[in-house]
Structures are given as C-alpha cells and as structure tokens.
Amino acid sequence: MKADLHKAPRQRPTPGDNRNGVDLPRDSAMEKALIGAVLQDPDRAADLQSEWFYDLKPVAAAIRQLADAGVPVSLVTLCTRLRSMGLVDPEILLNDCDRACPSAVNFATWAETLAGLRARRQIIRHGLESIADAQRPDRPAREVLEDFQRRALEVGLGASESPGEVDLRRELQQLSIAYERAAQGILPDGIRTGFCDLDRILGYLPPQSVCLVAARPGVGKTSFALNVAAHVALHEAKPVGFVSLEMAGGELLNRLVCARASVDSAVVRRGELNAAEIKRVTAALGALASASLHFYDRGGLTMSQLNAVARRLVQAHKVELLIVDYLGLLRSGERGQSRYEETTLISSGVKALAKELRVPVLLLAQLNRASVREGRAPGLADLRDSGALEQDADSVVLLHKDGEDANPQPVRLTVAKNRNGPTGAIDLLFWQQFTRFDQAAKGEAWA
C-alpha cells in the first residue's frame, strides 16, 4: 500500500510536557517528517524555522546554522554538526526522519501545522504567566493588563523566542533587493502621504518610525492627518488606525466626506446642497464605506491605554499606519510629574510603541507661541513642552500659515527633521471650508 503523499504522517498532535497541569501541544512525527523533507530537498533548509519545533528543536537549529553558513545540508554535514553539539549516534535519528517523510512536497503544509502548534504553546505559556501576574497583589492591574496584551501581540505577529534579535542574513537579503529595485527606479515599499513633493523629501514613512506633525491651533493639523489617512486607505488600500483624543469619529468622517466631495461643511450642515453636490457627497460616502479606516475617539487616554488601543487595531484590523491626534491630550499615567516630564515619557513611549507594532506612527502636536510673538516661521525649538519630541521623532513636519487670510489659505510645510534623508519645504493650499489640503503647484481638488 502506497503512502498518501498529501497527508501528514499523523493527524493529531501528541501531548507535550505538562506545565501546571496543562499539556503543551506538539507532534513529534510531523517534526521528523519536516526534517526528512529538508534532507530530501536541501533547498528547503533556508525556509526552516527552529521555533516551529519542540522535540527536535536542536536538529532544526543545526540545519539553520548550516544554511546560514552557506554549507549544503546533507546527511553527512548534519551528522557532523549534531555530533559537535553533543548528540550521540545522530544517524539513527536522521534515518528515522528520512523514513517519516513520504514526500518533500508536503513541506509547506507541515510547516504551517507546526507553526500553529508553536503558537498554541506560546498562548499557553503566556496565559500561565499572565495568571501568575494577576494573582500577585503587588503588581498594579494596569501593568498586568499591558503585559498580557504585549504577550498576545507577540503570538499574533509570529514573534520569535527573542523578538528583538535581528536576523542578519534576512536583513541583508532585503537590503540587496531594495538596492536592486532602486537601481531600476522602483520606489521602496512604505507609507506615502499622497503629497508628492513631501513624499520626495521623506521618501516614505518606514515601519517603526514616528513622524511628528506640529502646528499652532487652527492651521489644520487634523485636516492634514485626515488627508493622509484617506490617501493611504483609499489609494494605497492599506488599513489605517486613527486615534482621536479631541474630535468624535462622526465629525472626523464628516470632514473626510466634505474634503473628498469638495463641498462646504457649513452648507452640508444646513442641508442646502444642490444636485451636483449631492451626487459628489453620495460618491464620497460610497468610496469611504469601502475604505479600511478605523477610528477610536476616546479622550483623556493614558500612554498605557493608547498602547492597548493600538495593539487591538493592529491585531484586529492589521493597520499599517497609526495616527494619534494629538500628543497634548495624552497623559503618561504617572502621578506627580511636571508636563515636561510627562511629555518626555509620552514621546519615548510612542517611539517604543511604533517599534513594537512595526508600523509608522503619525503623531500630531502643538507648537508654542514663540514664533507667533516673534513674527517668524516656527522651528524645532518651538515644539511644545519637551525637547524629547525632537530627539525621539524620526521626522518632524511643521505647518505654518503663510501670509494673510485667504481662500484657499497658503500654508508652508517644512520638513525640519528627517533622519533618513534631506529636509526642505513645500507650499500647500488649505481649503478651510472643505477641510482639505492641496499642493500649491497642483491647485486642483484633492481626491
């Protein structure tokens, strides 16, 4: 009777070791089969992850060591490596692995199953750790909850046993690909704002970065952020999370509709739209209904609560850009601190959050009054409450009204800091009645 080449050697996981009365799931037969698949098809060695394994983790680690060193994986090279690691008679084990594999074509299926078992083991371990933390009266409930959410996110993102460790080989390969694509004129992957002149300066908003957008009240920080959010969600089809500590979600959506339909928000509120405007509003509503935009509009958030909200947005909606409006309304959650100390903690906390979630964060902030009093354009020194904002942000964008009140209003956008490239300035037009920004050079409706 021939073996079924499309079935795993065992359909049910075998019980794992017992931890506090809970079995950690594993499947020894499938682990052997996956090792056997690599012996039959050595090119698969680079795809193998030792974290998938439980019983045969040292063998999988030895395979990855050979692959990373550029040594072809074979029965001979793997036996030699395992003997150097102290394993006696590795030939017997590897022959069992080879016999357990009916065909290497099942590699992907078995790998997915073992990765799922590994995730289940993580869930059990993290759950037990969280239960132990929750039972400790000396630990604040807020800290216990934040640790629980962080552990859950590690499982959801497929984090490794050492989530902070950089895979040098993988990173170098990605850099090589990026260099080749750049030589061919292909732009790198990342979040673009939709303002082409700004994107030429920033390049894009890379994962784990913080872009600080600062201005005086009334210049249009929220409108600018909404323009970016709509571009990313509608034109790049990437999910966006928008955390608003100031405005309600319905008000933000009204601004988006008016901006996209080019209608005066005051006319909409009065119900005085003409037939052409109604048609544009209907089209805008339809477009936004299909966009992956996710709003959270609770005020008075602490940094810990923002972390929890952001993690949920990433887990539930896979957001690729997080917008926070705005920093001045966030609280550190620590008592007895000055606003300077609090802003410093929030600034470093937002940067840590961006790195943890591996998404760019667009953080809105206010400028102090110095530039207005002195009649000059704002600079980095005008960031309000803490010098840590300039230090922690990867890029800083300043918005400044340029000239007398007009419609549209000229606005100067200055990239005052750019960790990954040049600085510079561009001219925008702000249509206050539409709550929309356009590039001055285009002068056309934003879409």
Image (cartoon, rainbow, N blue to C red):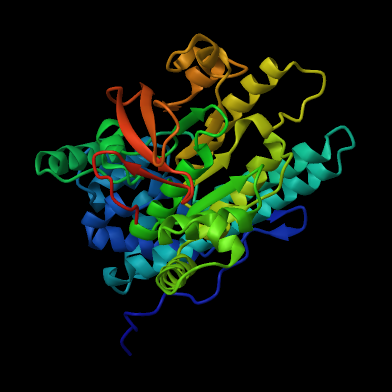
Q: Position of residue 272 (x, y in %)?
A: 54, 67
Measured as percent of width and height from the top left, residue 291 is found at 45, 64
Q: Quadrant of residue 414?
A: top left
What percent of the width, then of the height, locates residue 24? 64, 58
Q: Is residue 82 above or below residue 44?
A: above
Q: How many numbered markers are drawn? A: 0
The image quadrant where one finds the N terminus is bottom left
Q: Decide if residue 437 is on the left or right side of residue 433.
A: left
Which residue is found at the position 54% from the left and 52% from the top? 314
Nearest the eye: 49 or 426: 426
Identify the residue shown where x is 58% and y is 67%: 271
**Image location (x, y in percent) of residue 92:** 37, 57
Q: Can residue 53 be seen in this snapshot?
A: no
Q: Nearer the viewer, residue 423 or 369?
A: 369
Residue 67, quarter of picture: top left
Q: Is residue 41 above or below residue 83?
A: below
**Considering only vertical position in the picture, is 82 above or below 12?**
above
The quadrant of the image that shows the C terminus is bottom left
Closer to the camera in the image, 122 or 226: 226
Residue with the most extreme top position = 374
